[in-house]
Amino acid sequence: MAADPKSAVGGTRRPNPAQPWSIEDSRELYGVRAWGKGYFGINAAGHVTVRPDTTERHEIDLHEVVQGLAARDLATPVVVRFSDILAHRLRRLHDAFAQAIAENDYHNGYAAVFPIKVNQQRLVVEEVYRYGREFGFGLEVGSKPELLAVMAMTENAPDRLIVCNGFKDDSYIEAVTLATKLGRTIIPVVENFEELGLILKHAATYQVRPRIGVRVKLSSEGSGRWSASAGDKSKFGLFVSEILELFAVLKSHDMLDCLQLVHCHPGSQLQDIRRVKDAINELAHVYAELRLMGAGLQYLDVGGGLGVDYDGSGTNFTSSMNYTLVEYASDVVYRIASVCNARNIPHPMIISESGRAIAAYHSVLIFDVLGASALDKFQVSGEPATDYQGSEELPQPVQDLFVAYRTVSDRRVVECYHDALTAREQVLQMFNLGLLSLEFRALAERLYWATCARIRDACRKLERLPEELEDLESILSDTYFCNFSVFQSLPDSWAIDQQFPIMPVHRLDERPVRTAVLADITCDSDGKIDHFVSLRDVKRTLELHELHPGEKYYLAVFLVGAYQETLGDLHNLFGDTHVVHVRLHDEGGWWIEEIVKGDTANKVLEYMEYDVAELYPALARDCERAIRDGRMTLAESQAVKRFYEGELDGYAYLEPAGA
Ligand SMILES: Cc1ncc(COP(=O)(O)O)c(C=O)c1O
C-alpha cells in the first residue's frame, strides 16, 4: 500500500475538554492557518476574517459581510468574491517569478495568461485582466466563444498576450487571424496537425504573418487527477515527429520565424513538484532543439497546474501540494535557464497558464443551515418498565437490547456493539415475518441508537479506538441540511470528491459540540458533503455547533473561485446563487462593488426552454375557470396569481419563514 502522504505532517493540538473553548482551539480544529495562507483567520469575536492582502491592517469580518448582505435583501446562499485577493494572487505570482528571474540571472521575463475557463464570469475575467495590466499578464482561451469574448476585452491592447488552446475549426483560426490583423499579440497553439493548414490558409487570405505555437505531447506523465493531460495517450498535442513535420512545412513556406511558442500542460493541481520539474525539463529541451534548428521561438509556455493547498497539509495528497509558489517559480526558471545555458541559446519569455492558483482563493461560498437530524437523539432509561408502557411480554431480542444498553462500559464497548447489532437484526427478521409489532420495532430502534450513542461516548474516553468502532462517530453524526446545491456551487465536490475547507462563519469562540455531514437541498442522495479537509487525514464529519431555534447558523466553503462556478449545473433547477464583489475601502472597512442577483425561477425555467411568457397566463386561465365554477372567490384567485408571479421572480433557493 502506498504510504499515506500526510503521515509526516506534524500533530495538531487536541482541544482539552476540561478547558473552556478558545478561538485558538477553533483555528487548530479547522486548520485555518494551514489552508488560509494568511487570507483567512478568526477574530476575537469568533468570526471568520478575511485579509485580502494578508496583512493585519486590512481585515474584513465575514459575519459582518453576511449581515450586511442580509440587510440588502441578499439572502444566503451567496458567493462572496474578494477582488483584492485576486489582485494579491496576481502580484504574488509576478513577485515569485521576478525573484526567481533575479536569482537565476535569467535574461528574459515572465507573464501569466489567465485561462478564462477557470472562471469565465465576465466580472472575474475583467478584474484579472485589469489587475494583471501592470505585470503584462494576458489571457488564455480554449474555445471560439472564449476567444470572441477576449477579442473584445483586449481592445486597444496590442501588448497583452492571448494564447489560444483547444480544438480549432476554420472559423476559430479565422478569428485568430483577424485578431492578428487588428494588432493583437495572439498565438494559436497547434494541438493537432490539421490546424496548421488552416493557419496557413487564413494567413495567406488575410495577408498576415501569424504567430504560431505548438503543444508538445510530453512523455513525462502528469500526476494527480488530471494526469492524462500529459503523456503519450494525452488527448492534446503533437508527437515529436509531428512537430518535426510542422517545422518542415513552415520551413518550406519560409515561415520559421512564425513558430514562436512551445507549450505543454502537465495537468491541473500538480501535487508533486517532481512532475513539474520533469515536464519543464522535457519542454525546455524541445525548445532548445527547435531553436537551434532555426525556429524563431520566443516563448516557452509551461501551461497550468500550479496547485492550491486545499487542505493545508503541504503534502503530495490530491487536495494539497508539496511545494510553494516560490519553489514552483524557482524550479521553472532554473530548469529553463540551465537547459538554455547548456545549449548556449537565448532565454525565452516564460509564460504560465496558471488558473487555479490565481482564482481559487478569492471566492467564498456562504450558506445557512436549515435544520439538522440526529441519530443520537433517542432517549431511553434502560428500564423496561419505564421505556415500555404496554402489557405484552418483551420479545427476546428487545430484552437483549435493554441488556446491551445497560451494560455499556469502557471495557465492553465492542462486545456491547456486537450484542446490539445481533439483537437489531433479529428484531428486523421477526418484524418481516409478522412476529413483532410496530411498537416493539420502534422501541428496538430507540434502544439500538441509544446504545450506539453510549458506546460512542465511551469510545471518546479511550486512548485507542477499536478498529471495528472507527466508523461509529461518523455513523452517529448529524446531518445538517444546508441551503445550497452541491451540483450548482461545488460540482467538483460531487464529481471528483474534491475537498474544500469548510467552517462556520461565526460562533468560533464556542465549542462545537456536534459532528455532522452536510446535505444540500437537492432531491439527490449524492447532494452531500461527507469528506472534510484535515491536516492528517480526510475527516468523515465536521465539528459544528448546536443549532439554536430562530437563529441563523452560517457555514462557509473556502477556495471555491476556480472551476466551481462555471462547471455548476441546474440540478433541481437551483440556479446561480447571488454573487457580490467585496472590496477593501481606502479609509478602512469594506464596501460592495458589484451585486449580481442569483437566478430567479423564471430564469432557470427559461434555460430549460419553458416559455416563461406563457406560464402566468396558463395559471391565470385556471384561476378564471375556478371562479367561473365557484371553486374560488375573486380575492382567492388574485392571491394565487400574485403568489405565483412573486415566486417566478423570486430566488430559487429556500427562504425560510421569518428570514
Ligand atoms: C491547456 C490548459 N492550460 C491551463 C489550464 C489551467 O490549469 P490550472 O488551473 O491547473 O492552472 C488548463 C486546465 O486544465 C488547461 O487545460
Image (cartoon, rainbow, N blue to C red):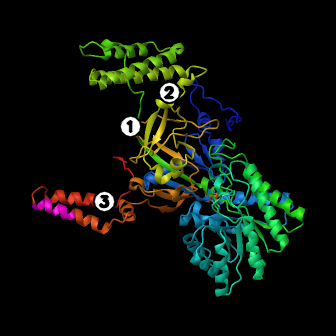
Label 2, label 1: how far apart the Cα atoms are: 27 Å
Q: In the rendered structure, which amino acid carries the disc numbered 2?
A: Leu
Crowding near the residue tagged with mark 3, few <14, some 14–19, many ≥20 C-alpha atoms within 10 Å? few
Give the residue pinned by disc 3: 646
Which label sits in the foreground, 2 or 1? Answer: 2
Label 2, label 3: how far apart the Cα atoms are: 46 Å
Whole-percent x and y of residue 340?
85, 64
Q: In the rendered structure, which amino acid carries the disc numbered 3?
A: Gly
Give the residue pinned by disc 2: 472
Between 87 and 151, the residue placed more toward the observer is 151
Which of marks 3 and 2 precedes in the sequence?
2
In the image, is the residue at mark 3 within 8 Å of ligand 1 by its beta carbon? no
Whole-percent x and y of residue 635?
16, 58
Quarter where residue 174 is shown: bottom right
The magenta span reads: 620-628
In the image, is residue 174 above or below residue 617?
Answer: below
> How would you classify the magenta stretch by its main secondary structure?
helix
Q: Are marks 2 and 1 in contact (CB under 8 Å)?
A: no
| Residue 356 colored in magenta in the image | no
For the point 32% across and 60% down, the residue is 648
For the point 65% across and 60% down, the residue is 87
Q: Please tell me in which quarter of the rendered image ligand 1 is found.
A: bottom right
Whole-percent x and y of residue 89?
67, 57
For the point 85% across and 61% down, the residue is 339
Give the residue pinned by disc 1: 549
For the point 68% across and 78% down, the residue is 158
